[in-house]
Image (cartoon, rainbow, N blue to C red):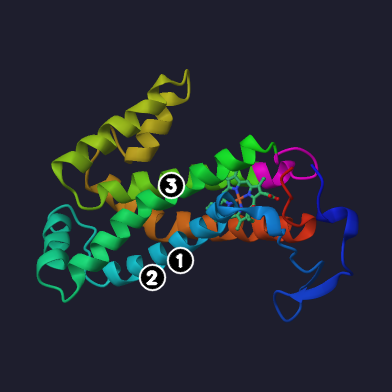
Amino acid sequence: MTDSESKQPPKRPLRLLPLVKVHLPPLVVPRSLGWAGCFGGLALVQFTIQIYTGILLLIYYKADPMRAWDSVTFIKSNVPMGWLIQRVHTVSAKMMIALVLMHMARVAYYRIYRHPREWHWISGVILLSLTTFMGFTGYLLPWTNLSYWAASVGTEIPTAVPVVGDGIATWLRRGPNVSGETLGFFFAMHVAVIPALIAGVMGMHFIMIRRTGISKPL
Ligand code: HEM
């Protein structure tokens, strides 16, 4: 893999916070990146769409088993443009997972996971897991029959792990079965914990990319 690191331009300080200065070279994008090289950037665009549409949905959504389904129905039928915001949020969640997988497939195909980009790959695997978990927790929020059983089956999977499996499943459900407690827990994960983790790991992913530059496929 030939790449930009052989001819690195001089490093320029990047100010992240008033007190933190990281010395990184300017980003060099190879001309031969091709359309498949856009999947990572497009995944970032999808993430931004998810944050904005998610904040709008939060205005009316109620994370309570007695009101969750009604609140989603209200958003779709009564809130001006609510159906559009809800649709964009659902469709772009699926697109984000598809784009992250396509981005990963490109990286695997060109073997860009090798030195000096092994930590790009490791942070990417964490991002893929977080993105999947984001989709899984979000699926329960409308509190439909389908989402209830999807969460029941999904949280059953860890029970296959010896010794700790049952404990993990009970921890995820906040009890022996999927209930209102699970809804509250998944809601907190979906709107606060996982997005914050994704944003943090993405930041590290991008700093690593700035350090090595984007590779030039043969
Ligand atoms: C939320 C998910 C992700 C976002 C937003 C993201 C974003 C990006 C962007 C914008 C780039 C630079 C342009 C490019 O090469 O495409 C990049 C590079 C890279 N990403 Fe990701 N990425 C994500 C997930 C992943 C995953 C799942 C993996 C692999 C497991 C991965 C591994 C890499 C590697 C190895 C590079 C360096 C590619 C090169 O130098 O050509 N990323 N990522």
Residue 50 in magenta stretch: no
Q: Which residue is the site of mark 2? A: 52
Residue 97, numbered label: 3
Q: Quadrant of residue 199?
A: bottom right
Q: Which residues are magenta?
A: 112-121
In the image, what residue type sits under mark 1? Thr
Q: Is mark 1 within 8 Å of ligand 1?
A: no
Residue 48, numbered label: 1
Judged from the image, the secondary structure of the residue bearing numbered disc 1 is: helix
Judged from the image, the secondary structure of the residue bearing numbered disc 2 is: helix
In the image, what residue type sits under mark 2? Tyr
Q: Where 44 falls versus 177 (above or below)?
A: below
Quadrant into which the N terminus falls: top right
Q: Residue at x 42, y 44 (%)?
A: 133
Left or right: 137 in relation to 211: left
Q: Where 96 falls versus 178 (above or below)?
A: below
**Which of the two marks, 2 or 3, is nearer to us in this view?**
3
Compare residues 1 and 52 and report the one nearer the observer.
1
Q: Earlier in the sequence, mark 3 or mark 1?
A: 1
Left or right: 54 in relation to 218: left
Compare residues 14 and 213 and report the one nearer the observer.
213
Q: Counting other residues with Cα less than 10 Å from the Cα at mark 1, is it few (<14), some (14-19), or many (20 or more)?
A: few
Pointer 1 and pointer 2: residues touching (CB < 8 Å)? yes
